[in-house]
Amino acid sequence: MDSIDTLVVGAGVIGLACADALARTGREVVIIDAEPRYGSGISSRNSEVIHSGIYYPPGSAKARLCVRGRRLLYDFCAEHGVPHRRCGKLIVATHAGQIPDLERLLARGLANDVEALRLIDRAEAQQIEPALECVAAIHSESTGIVDSHALMTALLGRAERHGASLALQTRFASATQVSEADGGFVVQLADTDSTMALRVANLVVAAGLHGPSTTARIDGFPADRLPVERYAKGNYFALAGRSPFSRLIYPIPEKDGLGVHLTLDMGGQARFGPDVEWVESPDPAVNAARMPAFYGEIRKYWRGLADGQLRPDYAGIRPKIYAPHEPAADFDIAGPAEHGVRGLVCLFGIESSCLTSALAVAGEVTTALAH
């Protein structure tokens, strides 16, 4: 039976970042993914925003890892030539009743050590974005955008330069602990033609939407530590024509999401979304029936949106680990200290801002396996 030091399950942005970090410590790392291409799951269906860290409760893993991850990400992109732009963002109040919400959000961002945040009035907001309709806004100058596919390619490239390897169309079937005292696992893998067993000392589950169901196939993981796998679709609609804004425009955040906002890609194309649509299965098809609601939400901050300017673009699925009626869950990075299984780290509910936080999450995983 072949043996390796570390197996990473999942070749999305989180799995690739973990593999890169672990390989750079000298570990022998293999990454597997069931798809024919890396980064083709939920990592390929997001807003490609580099978040500042303003939204998350102070002291939470989301707040800490987003702020640290953003700083690491800007440095990584600059060093490795990954296309990105620090374009900035405006979070807007569209009526006076929302100004206290902005003030609370600003206080939260400052508590999270987010730099370059300030509250501006309507006149200043319209001076920098003339098409915008608002009564006040938070200007977040550290927010940006990134080419997520180029980022994942760069992460994989650096991991491979440090000895990591990638096996695509390879499915994780199960894992059995070798011994509680010595640690290690025998992992069963399957590709299109055959199955094989692999002995691994360490196992990292970065399976995105399917983190809980994948972990359930690991013998010895405590059932009471396993979250329920849930899905919240986010639909995106693209704007026909040139964007009226040079910055990202966000409304006041809503429960389970950040509201229907305007983002830009590296080519300047504007898109709106995502909304929040709880679904029973992770179907990535855009729900075009939600388009009328988009027009209503967008016109609260951009009255110039004309009928017929939106078209269905794509949809992403958030890997939720809480129900719609429950409070939002924090990132769940479950290492040996949390579940008692030596050499195992499982990642649950790594949703927004996972792209921004990826390098910081990878650091947490590396630390968890070092103890």
Image (cartoon, rainbow, N blue to C red):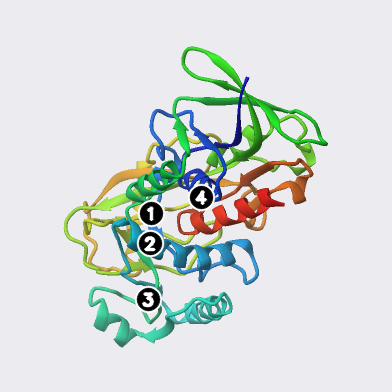
Give the CA separation, mark 1 to mark 2. 10 Å
Q: Name, please, the residue furthest toward the right.
A: 181
Earlier-in-chain disc, 3 versus 1: 1
Q: Which mark is residue 178?
A: none
Closer mark to the observer between disc 4 and disc 3? 4
Q: Name, please, the residue furthest toward the left.
A: 241
The answer to whether residue 97 is left or right of residue 346 is left
Q: Position of residue 279 (x, y in %)?
A: 53, 40
In this figure, which residue is indicated by the disc labeled 3? 141
Q: Secondary structure at mark 2?
A: loop
In this figure, which residue is indicated by the disc labeled 1? 47
In this figure, which residue is indicated by the disc labeled 4? 24
Give the CA separation, mark 3 to mark 2. 17 Å
In this picture, is 262 found above or below 174? below
Q: Position of residue 164 (x, y in %)?
A: 48, 39
The answer to whether residue 339 is left or right of residue 214 is right
Crowdedness near tag 1: few (<14), some (14–19) or many (≥20) residues, C-alpha within 10 Å: many
In this picture, is 53 found above or below 268? below
Earlier-in-chain disc, 1 versus 2: 1
In this picture, is 100 found above or below 307? below
Earlier-in-chain disc, 3 versus 2: 3
Tag 4: amino acid: Arg
In this figure, which residue is indicated by the disc labeled 2? 261
Q: Secondary structure at mark 1?
A: loop
Tag 1: amino acid: Ser
Closer mark to the observer between disc 1 and disc 2? 1
Is mark 1 in CB contact (under 8 Å) with mark 2? Answer: yes
Tag 3: amino acid: Glu
Give the CA separation, mark 4 to mark 2. 37 Å
Q: Position of residue 370 (x, y in %)?
A: 67, 51
Is mark 4 in CB contact (under 8 Å) with mark 2? Answer: no
